[in-house]
Image: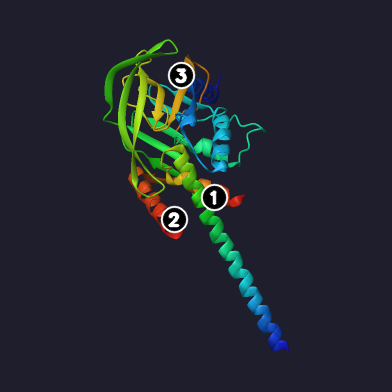
């Protein structure tokens, strides 16, 4: 019984961690897309500093 | 008066005279900046992008920069006029400062023929020795700015784009020989007169106030803090960072 509980807990914990990781990656990609949208809207390529700032601030929202 | 008193008096006189001499006459130019983009022509499906640009225009309008200079050196930096309504940490505020490469401090030393840019990047301070500014194409085109006759000069420059590649950009400067100091906003200098307007790609720095030959004490000294690095070394680091960022996000 104990083993079953332990296995279930491990499976659930791994699933939660993977979901959180996927969400973070998805958020980063969404924010990168937002930065690309902004670049397109402005009509010029940002420098790396500006681009990474947009992504960083977007992720913090 | 004994020997020691005489010595102290002499020392005091010397100190005072050195102090008076070091307070050189300087001049002060206040610039503002704006984005050279026609909003009506730009379209985006991204509502957030449109909203951001609208607030960014407003935030940019509150920013001011000062160029302090004397015969030997100059310093260009943002004037900290931030008040409570200027949300320091908002995306629009931060981006309004970053556009036009106006973050940090630019220092020009004419005697040593050096230009430095101190800025914070990736949580580190850098003191970047800039490449020499040359190859200006001086034209006869002219216009009036604040009752000064200004001539147009252009040059090509590059920056490290978000793709990690070197991107070409055009610099347009309007300088006036009526103020015979070869300084200007950011790192741009070397023209036969002061730059009163500078177009750095899509951002324009324009003059708001000109105050010449001031006597009050102003500190025009080289920033000290930061990892010393050359422009080309800095660019190659940024290129590497940008390329690995693109690789990581699959773009």
Q: Chain of mark 1?
A: A
Q: CA distance from mark 2 to mark 1?
A: 12 Å
Q: Decide if residue B79 is on the left or right side of residue B166.
A: right
- Label 1: few (<14), some (14–19) or many (≥20) C-alpha neighbours in 10 Å: some
Above/below status of B44 relative to A60: above
Secondary structure of residue under mark 1 = helix
For marks 3 and 2, the one nearer the N-term is 3
Q: CA distance from mark 3 to mark 1?
A: 39 Å
Residue labelled with disc 3: B27
Residue labelled with disc 1: A56
Q: Nearer the viewer, residue B59 or B83?
A: B59
Do tag 2 and tag 1 residues touch (Cβ < 8 Å)?
A: no
Above/below status of B153 relative to A50: above
Q: Nearer the viewer, mark 3 or mark 2?
A: 2
Secondary structure of residue under mark 3 = strand
The residue under the point 71% across, 83% down is A5
- Locate residue B60, reporting x and y percent: 54, 31
Q: CA distance from mark 3 to mark 2?
A: 43 Å
């Amino acid at each position: 019984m104990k083993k079953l509980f332990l296995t279930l807990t491990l499976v659930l914990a791994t699933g939660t961690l993977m979901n959180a990781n996927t969400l973070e990656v998805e958020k980063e990609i969404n924010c990168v897309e937002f930065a690309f949208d902004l670049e397109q809207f402005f009509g010029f390529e940002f420098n790396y500093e500006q681009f990474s700032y947009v992504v960083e601030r977007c992720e913090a929202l | 008066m004994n020997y020691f008193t005489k010595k102290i008096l002499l020392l005091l006189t010397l100190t005072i005279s050195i102090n008076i001499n070091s307070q050189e006459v300087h001049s002060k130019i206040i610039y503002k900046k704006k984005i050279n983009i026609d909003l009506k022509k730009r379209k985006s499906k991204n509502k957030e992008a449109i909203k951001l640009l609208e607030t960014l225009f407003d935030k940019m309008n509150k920013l001011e920069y000062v160029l302090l200079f004397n015969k030997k050196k100059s310093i260009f930096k943002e004037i900290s006029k931030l008040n409570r309504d200027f949300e320091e940490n908002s995306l629009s505020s931060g981006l309004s400062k970053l556009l036009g490469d106006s973050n940090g401090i630019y220092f020009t030393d004419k005697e040593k023929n050096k230009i430095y840019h101190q800025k914070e990047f990736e949580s580190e301070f850098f003191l970047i020795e800039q490449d020499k500014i040359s190859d200006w194409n001086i034209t006869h085109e002219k216009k009036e700015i604040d009752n000064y006759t200004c001539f147009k000069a252009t040059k090509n420059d590059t920056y490290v784009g978000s793709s990690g590649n070197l991107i070409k950009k055009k610099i347009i400067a309007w300088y006036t020989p009526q103020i015979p100091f070869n300084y200007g906003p950011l790192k741009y200098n070397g023209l036969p007169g002061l730059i009163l307007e500078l177009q750095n790609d899509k951002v324009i720095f324009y003059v708001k106030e000109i105050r010449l030959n001031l006597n009050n004490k102003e500190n025009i000294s080289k920033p000290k803090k930061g990892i010393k690095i050359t422009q080309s070394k800095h660019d190659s680091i940024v290129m590497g960072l940008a390329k690995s960022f693109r690789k990581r996000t699959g773009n």
